[in-house]
Amino acid sequence: MSLIDDKKNVILPYKRFIKTDAYGSPQYAPPVDDECWLKNERLLVRDESGKEVVSESAIFTNLRVNPQDVFVIGGKNVRVIRVSDKTNLDGDFDHCEVRL
C-alpha cells in the first residue's frame, strides 16, 4: 500500500515524453489514465535547468514521472516542471511528487 492511496482524488490522463520531432514539437506516448492526488498550491520551484519558476499545483502519483512528460488537465497538456521521488518507510520507491 502506498502512502498516498487514501488521498487520491482525481483520475488524469498522463503522457510520457518520447522525443522532439524535426520541427521541434514534443512527441508523446498515448495517454494513460492515472489515479492520483491533485493539490492546488502555488510554490516557487527550480526547473530541470535550475531556473526559478512558479508551480501552480502538485500531483502525487505512483507512476515514475519525468520532466517533459505531461498531464492533461482541463483538456490541456500541462508540462511537468519538477519531479521528486518519495520513498516508503522501508526505503523503497513509493510515489512521485510532480510539480506543474
Image (cartoon, helix red, strand yellow):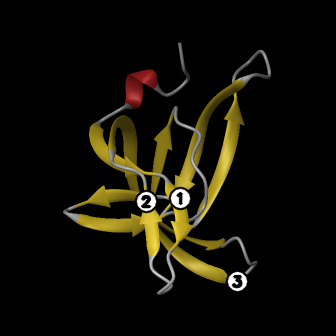
Residue 47: give x, y in percent of width and height.
Answer: 66, 73
Question: For the residue labelled by badge 1, is the local secondary structure a helix, a strand or a loop?
Answer: strand
Q: Which residue is mark 3?
A: 51
Mark closer to the observer (3, 2): 2
Residue type, mark 3 in image: Lys
Report helix, strand or loop for mark 2: strand
**Mark 1 or mark 3, whichever is nearer to me:** 1
Which residue was labeled with disc 2?
28
For image coordinates 54% across by 20% down, the residue present is 2
Q: CA distance from mark 1 to mark 3?
A: 23 Å
Residue drawn where x is 50% and y is 84% of the image:
24
67, above or below 64, in the image: below
Question: Disc 1 residue type?
Answer: Ile
- Looking at the picture, how far across and down is residue 44, in whole percent? 60, 74
Q: Nearer the viewer, residue 51 or 66?
A: 66
Element class at badge 3: loop
Mark 1 or mark 3: whose residue is earlier in sequence: 1
Residue of label 1: 18
User: Closer to the N terminus: mark 1 or mark 2?
Assistant: 1
**Which amino acid type is shown beneath numbered disc 2?**
Tyr
Residue 56: x %, y % from top left? 43, 69
Quadrant position of residue 70: bottom left
Mark 1 in CB contact with mark 2 (< 8 angstroms): yes
Q: Residue furthest front?
A: 22
The CA span between labels 1 and 2 is 5 Å
